[in-house]
Amino acid sequence: MMTYIAPIRDMQFVINELADLSTINTYPIYEDATAELVTSILDEANKLASEVLAPLNYSGDIQGNTLKAGVITTATGFKEAYTQFVESGWNGLHSNPDFGGQGLPALVSTAVSEMWHAANMSFGLCPMLTQGAIEAIAHHGSDALKAVYLAKLIEGTWTGTMNLTEPQAGSDLSAVRAKAVPNGDHYLISGQKIFITWGEHDMADNIIHLTLARTPDAPEGVKGISLFVVPKFLVKADGSLGERNDVYCTSIEHKLGIHASPTAVMVFGDKAGAVGYLVGEENRGLEYMFTMMNHARLSVGLEGVAIAERAYQQALRYAKERTQGREMGVKGGERVAIIKHPDVRRMLMSMKSQIEAMRAVAYVTAAYMDKALAESDTTKQQAAMALVDLLTPIVKGWCTEASIEITSTGVQVHGGMGFIEETGAAQHFRDARITTIYEGTTGIQASDLVGRKIARENGATAKVLLAEMSGVATELANAVGDDCAAIHRAFTDSIHALTEATEWILANYAQNPKQPSAVAVPYLRLFGIVTGGWQMAKAALIAQAQLQKGQDPHFYEAKLITARFYAEHVLMQASGLAYSVMNGAVSTLALQEEQF
């Protein structure tokens, strides 16, 4: 079974040259995050990812989890791998040092998280959800809640979950029915939650469920939702674990992919009532939960990058090893590896170029998060946060949608063997399929982008980003070489397409929001492709400059050519997508329901 090796050189390029670590570590809270330290961190993370987590990916997919009497036993090796993960300190990389975290930039923890998800996406989901729980409690919990829960969650000896969905309340959280009845210093929670990732397992001492529920006098709809901490085991005054709380897993789902990640049905309060502790104020739960959800959405977008990278590595290795046919245009001769065939090259370049663009956008978004947290100038802080808000649905929606295409291409490179489970290529395709669904479907991300991030602020942040892109295009116009000229043509056209589509959204949303909503997904894809093109254009400029200095031609030539491929094969889709945005709403909405 093919393994995984982190693409450290490309990660370093994005971290240092595109996301600009040297600016991030000028902030006092990140001053220790030097390029040398980051390289050491990436090297060590790669060892755990490639040597411990990656070998469990296929076996975990085959074995899955077992549930007996409310207790889940994880796949062989997972518990030991998680213990090693925690003991090595990986869980607290980005967390607050006041509670035992290492306080490193999100830019760094994002690169490391990519490794976990690429090596073993099922495993990576557990610490990913824990990070979301940490964020929610850190931002909105009382000092008492922080004192009890944060250090253990950051350490990783306790894990966290997000309990939103109910059988009748999927994406529509206004339909949540779980109850929370006041009872002294806590609440008694009752109800059922479904699709709870890592809701029950045997890898940690305690599981902390962040749970949405309604108090008795709560108003209807989303305004009546509160957020509670519901631990699997109650915590005594001295911090030790006490009795089992009344929250249990009653079944686990049988899924298309991520088989080693238990997706649990959780029942709260089936006996005496599950003890829960209010986070913040009553009826502000959805607001608080969005702190966790936004973290998770960026993380799921990163999963798209990661699983695509894993599929690409496997396809590339197979293409270099699989002998089939003779080289086109060469008479006679030996049979050759399929990487010699033009269409296989096209598929590999499609995978490689999109992954590099996706990685860059995800990491740059993380860098904006760091600036928003560390910046003392309020205006600059707000500007950075506005870009994080704008880019979050793009990272989540575009990177995950692209991952399905890329992992499918990975199967195609393998030919018939890709359809056979034993090769592992099909698993990546299956695992990727959930990423466009959980933590808000692509449609929800697109609606958020169009309604909240574009229309509500009259496109202000989008216009800032478009201006930044135009500046890069101007630099390209002055760069030397045919490659930069080709990238300049495609990038300039794509900026024009995105600008026109954005103006159309702004002109039509207020008077008839249904029409922009009908084409929101094509708009999100357009925005993602052009944003990726922005980063690939910057990469091309850097590569050209380094080549002129004679620096690392093997790496930078590949960068330049990959950026040109992206421009000529991916960016060229922008004009078609813009046409769909500006013209496609009418036909989308025209049929009556009975005509379908």
Image (spheres, rainbow, N blue to C red):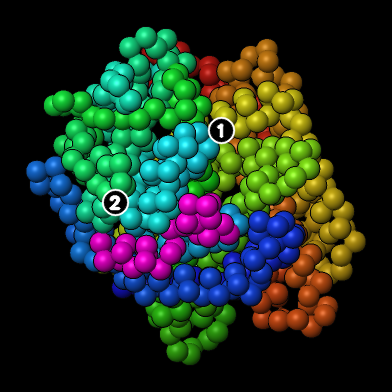
Residue 261 is labelled as: 2
CA neighbours of label 1 inside 10 A, class few (<14), some (14 to 19), many (20+): many
Residue 142 vertical placement versus 154 (above, below):
above
Secondary structure state at the residue bearing disc 1 = helix
Residue found 85% across the figure and 50% down from its top: 471
Residue 125 in sight: no
Q: Please state which of residues 261 and 477 is positioned toward the viewer in this rendering.
A: 261
Side of 518 relative to 460 (left or right): left
Q: How many marks?
A: 2
Give how far across and how far down residue 410 sits, in percent: 43, 62
Report the quarter where the N terminus lies: bottom left
Report the quarter where the C terminus lies: top left
Residue 456: quarter of image: top right
Side of 39 relative to 258 (left or right): right
The three-letter code of the residue at mark 1 reads Ala
Q: Find disc 1 in the rendering and name its residue.
A: 446
Residue 212 vertical placement versus 381 (above, below):
above
Q: Which residues are magenta?
A: 79-104
Q: Please state which of residues 557 and 183 is positioned toward the viewer in this rendering.
A: 183
CA neighbours of label 2 inside 10 A, class few (<14), some (14 to 19), many (20+): many
